[in-house]
Image (cartoon, grey):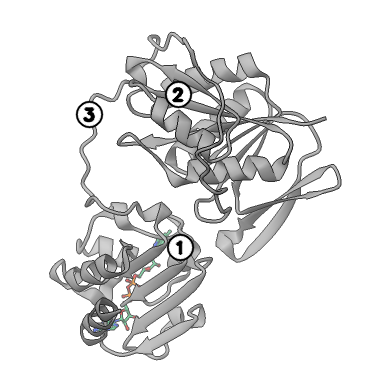
Amino acid sequence: MSKKLLVIGEVRDNVLRNVTFEAIAAAKKIDADGEVVGVLCGDSELNDQAQEMIHYGADRVVIVKHDNLKSYTSEGYGQAVLAVVNDESPDGIIMGHTAAGKDLTPKLASKLESGLISDATDIETNGDKVVFTRPIYSGKAFEKKVVTGGLTFTTIRPNNIPALEHDETRSGDVTEKEVDVTDIRTVIKDVIRKASEGVDLSEANVIIAGGRGVKSVEGFKPLYELAEALGGAVGASRGACDAEYCDYALQIGQTGKVVTPDLYIAVGISGAIQHLAGMSNSKVIVAINKDPEANIFNVADYGIVGDLFEVVPMLTEEIKKL
Ligand code: FAD
């Protein structure tokens, strides 16, 4: 029997995050013939975003609109999504392994006494079994999990499951569900961003990450120039954040963001195990370090031994010529 799968979309600054489209593709991997129902929460008209979800493969979309859903809160989104889950009785619920996904899915899974597979990087089917791959031990190994039955929540790691092709000829129903989200203890009035605008680090295809070797706030400038030339985002090691060269929002690693871009350029980063935990599954890793013995070279596909203050501007110049 084909499955009904809910995909919880995430909107930031009125734009759907890419991981939403990847979650739709994940739902199709679970059951190619199943029904994919998108869910969107917010305080404004989300019709364009709903259409976008349909163009990326959702069969229909349910919108929950309420003033208290302007920004993500555990309680607000929890109540909204729970109401949709109760209406739809899905077989599975999929969301990005984002800050919101990591918060919402375990909360609802425990409430509904259902299963949870978090941080899936791949999904395959084997007969009628669905097999989820997920990293363990900070990305040093992968385990495969099989769901044996019942409602299951899944979060998927951004940048691992390719989205389906955008197809504007796809159509589907968009409906609104009223949920009274007034009985909540926290409402976010305003969001003040400290980190610089630009490409979202957790979804970036290219990341230039700086470490303590960058030496100052000023030293990060050439990294931003390289990131701009490559259309990427800037990240950092905790060493660089602790030294106040950049904001903690840029930290990558065990206690920072976990990223899997197509290209990760580590600049002046030694390659401590806690840093590797956040980036070692990147598709191509380039390390720039003046110490040929630096541990980062053990995970790098390409290594450049040299002074970053010479190498990075040279790289930017060459890339700009392309
Ligand atoms: P360093 O180790 O000081 O390395 C600097 C590198 O720059 C060196 O390899 C040096 O050769 C190179 N360098 C210097 N000058 C130049 C130059 N001019 N040109 C080229 N190369 C140069 N760290 C994280 O990153 N993320 C985490 O999430 C994280 N979580 C942690 C959690 C715990 C519980 C603990 C205990 C630690 C955690 N850490 C984390 C810290 C981690 O252990 C390291 O201390 C940190 O990653 C080091 O940062 P770094 O590589 O930038 O600095």
42 to the left or right of 283: left
Query: In the rendered structure, which amino acid carries the disc numbered 1?
Result: Pro
Q: What residue appears at the point 53 percent right and 41 percent down from the top-left corner?
A: 56
Q: Secondary structure at mark 3?
A: loop
The disc at residue 77 is 2
Query: In the rendered structure, which amino acid carries the disc numbered 2?
Result: Tyr
Circle nearer the N terminus (1, 2): 2
The disc at residue 261 is 1
Mark 2 burial class by Cα count in 10 Å: few <14, some 14-19, many 20+: many
- Taking the view exactly as shown, the residue that stands out farthest to the front is 169
For disc 3, the marked residue is: 190
Q: Quadrant of the N terminus?
A: top right
Q: How far is the residue under mark 2 from the one under mark 3?
A: 17 Å
- Taking the view exactly as shown, the residue that stands out farthest to the right is 127
Where residue 2 sits in the image (x, y, percent)?
78, 31
- Residue 88 vertical position relative to residue 237 in the rendered view, above or below: above
Mark 3 or 1, which is nearer the eye?
1
Circle nearer the N terminus (3, 1): 3
Q: What residue appears at the point 45 percent right and 18 percent down from the top-left corner?
A: 64
Q: Quadrant of the C terminus?
A: bottom left
Front-most of 252 and 49? 49
Query: In the rendered structure, which amino acid carries the disc numbered 3?
Result: Asp
